[in-house]
Amino acid sequence: MKRVCFELRVKPDRLAEYTDEHARVWPEMLMALKSSGWHNYSLFMRPDGLVIGYFETDDLAAAQSAIKNSDANAVWQEHMADFLLDPGPSLSELTEVFHLEDQLSAGDDA
């Protein structure tokens, strides 16, 4: 399972609304994410609007393609675009540099 972390930025004057929208994500969008292969998906937000997203997937390219082609996602992205400072077409993926369980497992193998 691949772990994916990404960042985006919410407009400072839209933080409360962004949080409210994510407290009640549309059921169609929830099912689109699940059926597209996005697992264990979380968003974390700093007070300045930096959002860090995390999810796990078996196949990142397939998960991204499936969600991109989802009707629910198209409507959701249009709805959320005004909340973001840079509502670009892709996520700014972060590189994983440490994972506790991986290192513990590697130590067990030694």
Image (cartoon, rainbow, N blue to C red):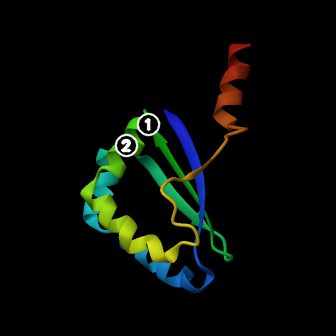
Q: Where residue 107 sits: x, y (%)?
A: 73, 21
Q: Where residue 33 sits: x, y (%)?
A: 35, 52
| Amino acid type indicated by mark 2 | Ser
Look at the picture and state if 5 lies above or below 28.
above
Given contact means CB atoms under 8 Å apart, are the residues at marks 1 and 2 in contact?
Answer: yes
- Point out which mark residue 65 bears: 2
**Is residue 74 or residue 5 the one in the foreground?**
74
Q: Is residue 23 visible?
A: no
Crowding at dot 2, Cα within 10 Å, few <14 / some 14-19 / many 20+, comes out as few
Q: Residue furthest bottom?
A: 13
Q: Quadrant of residue 72?
A: bottom left
Q: Is residue 63 visible?
A: yes
Q: Residue at x 57, y 67 (%)?
A: 86
| Amino acid type indicated by mark 1 | Ala
Q: Secondary structure at mark 2?
A: helix
Look at the picture and state if 19 lies above or below 30.
below
Is 60 left or right of 73, judged from the image as shown?
A: right
- Point out which mark residue 61 bears: 1
Quarter containing the C terminus: top right
Q: Where residue 65 sits: x, y (%)?
A: 37, 43
Is 71 left or right of 96, judged from the image as shown?
A: left
Q: Where residue 32 sits: x, y (%)?
A: 29, 53
Q: Residue furthest top?
A: 110
